[in-house]
Amino acid sequence: MKISRTYLKIFLSFLLVLVVSELIIYVLLHMSWDKSPLVHHMERQVLTVKNLVEMELGDVHTSPETERKIITPLLKNLSGSLEAHIWITGPYGEIIASSSTKVPDMTEFTEGNSAKSSKGIYVYKKRDDSMKSIYGVYTGKLPQGYPFTYHLYHSLPKFNEESWFLRAQAVLTIIAALFLIPVSRRVVRPLKKLTASASRMGKGDLKQRVEIKGKDEVAELGKAFNHMAEGLEKMVKSSRELTANVSHELRSPLARMRISLEMLKERIEQGNTSGCDVFVNGMQAEITHMDDLIGRIIKFSKLDLHKPPALEETVDMKGLLNELLEQYKYIAERNNLKLETELTDIKLSGCNRNGIRIVMDNILGNAFKYTDQGGTISVHLFRVKETVKIEVTNTHIPLQEDDLEEIFNPFHRLKAQEIPGSGLGLAAAKKIVRIHDGEISAKNCNKGFKLIVTLSSK
């Protein structure tokens, strides 16, 4: 079985985490010896011995012989329970009582560094070839005038706890290595499918999609891949449709020019020049139309090819809309259109003034162009939190749901629509709005047809 790189990366990362964690634990234990569990454990044991002895003897010192007789059996019992050597010394270092006949020599312990607990107990440690020893000392206040010093000594096998800790870490590493195999396969399998789908997509199969399972990062990657695939498919489809539509748009005037040219040649051959100026003027009009159409196509294409303009200007949105509406005043009067405006005084910063002007001019131009005589056009400018919204509504029959999205595609024209146009205005507006990190959408409403532009107010 071939081990995948992903599995090795996951396993090595896990192993590195274990090693680093062990080093951190080791450093913390040695840097904070006074806060280690052994110091707290020793503190509890010494205080237990002290409290029990004081309960047996009381507050007043009698005589060493009497005190030794009373507390020696107690120390022996505690020594067996705590698995430690316990002894008590007087204020002059004399032995008061001991759990064993021989008291260990603690000279080497007291010469080293010690840790002091919160209760005032000094704890020393020592390591040799095979043992680890802990020694705790505490001087109490009783008996009055003759205070006792309590000694407690543990001798344990060296690295007893550490060896178990290291064994546990080793077992954990082995178990993790085994469990990481199915985990890594679960991670790698969808990635391999993504790689295969991407490879087939690179060969031209744009219908490739991957199955989404779960809600993890791999699933998010799969969603992003599917979204990208859909976008690429739509882009290629739109590109093909754009080529077809351009061909169609240019073929129609060429066909009309060809017919006019044939009729003009026929009349000239017949020596009948009357009405020839009509054909010549018609061809000139078609040439002007083609030139304008080609200019619009080139300008639209530059929106993708050129570097986005710097968004560093500030636009007086109310002033801009009033200026554009003034240009359409003649059309409104001629078609008896009612104009309703509700414009808030808003300054839009962080934008390109010419781009915003093109967007609003295209939207208003469509509204005035596609509103029947006697209709109403409403322009509403307002602020919503950190965004600026422009809503342009005009009386119009409801559009099909597909058309509400398709009208933003290049050369898309509504069915049975006899008003001339190139179908590039809203497509250009959408591109410019996206350059500004905004949104543009269309919907049917009670008053007719509404276009909504949302721009971020920086």
Image (tube, grey):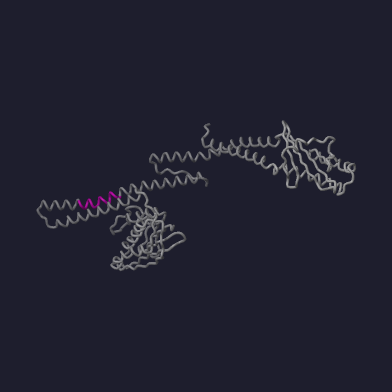
Which SS type dominates the magenta stretch?
A: helix
127 with respect to 429 (left or right): right
- Quadrant hosting residue 176: top right
Closer to us: 370 or 161: 161
From which residue to which does the magenta span run? 245-257
In the picture shown, does residue 302 fall above or below 157?
Answer: below
Which quarter of the rendered picture does the C terminus lie within? bottom left
- Quadrant hosting residue 78: top right
The answer to whether one can see residue 77 in this image is no
Q: Where is residue 86 shown, x and y percent of the image?
A: 81, 39
169 with respect to 186 (left or right): right
187 with respect to 83 (left or right): left
Q: Where is residue 161 shown, x and y percent of the image?
A: 70, 37
Q: Where is residue 159 shown, x and y percent of the image?
A: 70, 35
Q: How many marks?
A: 0
Q: Residue at x 41, y 47 (%)?
A: 230
Closer to us: 39 or 448: 39
In the picture shown, does residue 67 fall above or below 362?
Answer: above
Would residue 160 be counted in the magenta stretch?
Answer: no
Q: Residue at x 40, y 67 (%)?
A: 342
Q: Where is residue 33 shown, x and y percent of the image?
A: 69, 41
